[in-house]
Image (tube, rainbow, N blue to C red):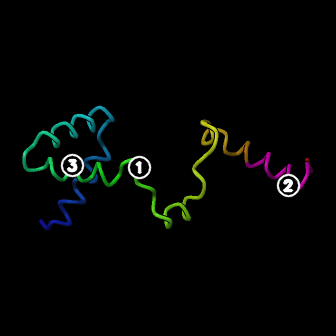
Amino acid sequence: MSVADDYEDLRHLVDRLTPAQVRHLRVLVSNDAELAGAASAQRVRHSAATPLPESFTALAGSIHGPGDIAEHHDDYIRQRLRERFGDHT
């Protein structure tokens, strides 16, 4: 098994964890002498003070919006189309 296989296996494992299990794993990693340094470096790299790369924001677009934007996506799109092109229904 290669290092790449190990990484892939760990990614799949973490994807299957519940939020509580992820928090538990973070505690275990941050309290392990060998892994704690990597965990703290990762936390610094992804802190709120660190801006997202321009390439990500260009790909994702604006991430600001109402809290229910995912649930009512179709409604928002219809509303924007009506505002732009008028109501043809």
Is residue 78 in the magenta section? yes
Q: CA distance from mark 2 to mark 3?
A: 48 Å
**CB within 8 Å, label 1 to label 2:** no
Give, as a single range, the part of the protein colored magenta. Answer: 77-88
Q: Earlier in the sequence, mark 2 or mark 3?
A: 3
Q: Eyeballing the image, is 85 above or below 20?
A: below
The N terminus - image quarter: bottom left
Mark 1 vs 3, N-terminal side: 3
Counting from the top left corner in percent of width and height, residue 56 is at: 49, 62
- Say whether marks 1 and 3 touch (CB < 8 Å): no
Residue hosting label 2: 84
Measured along the vertical axis of the image, is residue 62 above or below residue 55? above
Relative image position of residue 4 (x, y in whole percent): 20, 66
Q: Which residue is mark 1?
A: 49
User: Gap between marks 1 and 3, in whole Å?
Assistant: 17 Å
Q: Amino acid at mark 1?
A: Ala
Horizontal and vertical percent for residue 63? Answer: 57, 50
Circle 3 SS class: helix
User: Which circle, 1 or 2, is nearer the viewer?
Assistant: 1
Decide if residue 52 is on the left or right side of residue 6: right
State which tag comes first along the sequence, 1 or 2. Answer: 1
Disc on res. 39: 3
From the viewer's perspective, tell me whether residue 85 is left or right of residue 57. right
Identified at 27% across, 35% down, the residue is 23
**In 3D space, how far apart are the residues under numbered discs 1 and 2 (Cα atoms)?**
37 Å
Residue 7 x/y as whole percent = 22, 60
The residue nearer to you, when weighing 18 against 45, is: 45
Q: What residue do we see at 74% from left, 49% from top?
A: 77
